[in-house]
Amino acid sequence: MTDIILHHYGLSPFAEKVRIGLGLKQAAWKSVDIPSIMPKPDLMPLTGGYRKTPVMQIGADIYCDTQLIMLELERRLPSPAFLPEGREGEARAITMWADRLIFSPAVGVVMSQVADRFGEDFKKDRSDFSGRSFDPERMRAALPFLRDQTYALLSVAEAMLAGDAKFLLGGEPSLADCALYNPVWFIQQHLGATASPLDRLPGIVAWVERMGALGNGKRTDIKASDALDIAKAATPGKTSVDGGDPSGLKAGQKLSVTPDDTGKVPVTGTLVGLTADRISIARRDERVGDVVVHFPRSGFIVQAL
């Protein structure tokens, strides 16, 4: 298999979701460090404008959003499994719950307490990214609410870890654990191992230690320019369009694909792949040649041009 390349930065919580997944898979991968704020001149040629972190590259195939990145890793590296047999839907549902409901208040708990550490460039970037002002005073005022929400949601996971359960779905870690790990990891990285509300969740604290022991796989650092050269020398993998998809989209259509929450930068290209869980568009950039950029269907707005 062509090398896995992860474009990320160290304190990105969603990148940690993928890194811990690579540890679970005991996978070898190449690392490209990218800036935490725009501009990202060595990423844009690959993604066509998508600015979120992380992005996974395999040759000339570019995977955006951890929903899809993790499914692609599962397809290419099926053992150890992210999706336990017979409980695949449950693992994916818990993952979406963690990504969409727990992540935001958990990150808010952190940012409301560390916002003053960041410079004006970071504040402007995150304002542009989120569509609302990065206001430390407003964040501090929201801390009690955010902490309560995080505690309430993590208490559900605490209950799942009761008794003999080592992980959310039983004796082995799964995709669900990787998804929950990243917001808890983010709290611990900035505020400490038992920072509130983790101080009232001993099962979560013990579980996160078990997760951390998985490591991050076998990492090799490379230059961004090397990754771009790899893309240019490669040919995208085969894709197909489901002609019966309820969207009515057809192969060869010109489309834009845009996140529906934050970082709402449209990526345009030609439809070359469409399944129930992903949409793939071909595009060309002078620096990398022909690439195919893959997105999950959920959480993205697709418009015909």
Image (cartoon, rainbow, N blue to C red):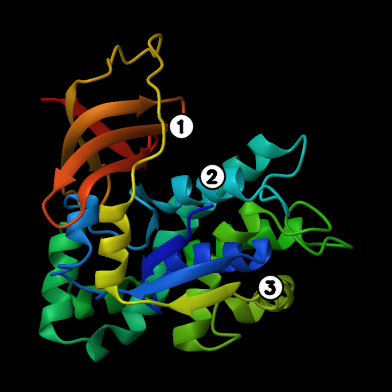
Whether residue 266 can be seen here: no
Q: How many marks?
A: 3
Q: Residues within 10 Å of mark 2 (few under 14, many from 20)?
A: some
Dot 3 falls on a residue whose secondary structure is loop
- Whole-number angstrom distance, CA of label 1 to CA of label 3: 28 Å
Q: Which residue is mark 3?
A: 214
Dot 2 falls on a residue whose secondary structure is helix
Image location (x, y in percent) of residue 171: 84, 58
Image location (x, y in percent) of residue 292: 30, 41
Q: Quadrant of residue 34?
A: bottom left
In this view, which residue lies farthest toward the top? 244
Whichever of labels 2 and 3 marks the residue nearer the N terminus, that label is 2
Looking at the picture, tell me which residue is in the foreground, 299 or 146: 299
Whether residue 171 can be seen here: yes
- Whole-number angstrom distance, CA of label 2 to CA of label 1: 9 Å
Q: Which residue is mark 1?
A: 277
Residue type at mark 3? Answer: Leu
Mark 2 in CB contact with mark 1 (< 8 angstroms): yes
Task: Please report the residue visible at 28 percent of the width from the left and 59 percent of the height from the top.
Answer: 52
Q: Residues within 10 Å of mark 3 (few under 14, many from 20)?
A: some
Looking at the picture, tell me which residue is in the foreground, 134 or 210: 210
Mark 2 in CB contact with mark 3 (< 8 angstroms): no
Point out the image quarter for the C terminus. Answer: top left
- In the image, residue 27 sits, relative to residue 209, either above or below, namely above
Is residue 45 found left or right of 294 in the rendered image?
left
Task: Please report the residue visible at 27 percent of the width from the left and 34 percent of the height from the top.
Answer: 281
Disc assigned to residue 71: 2
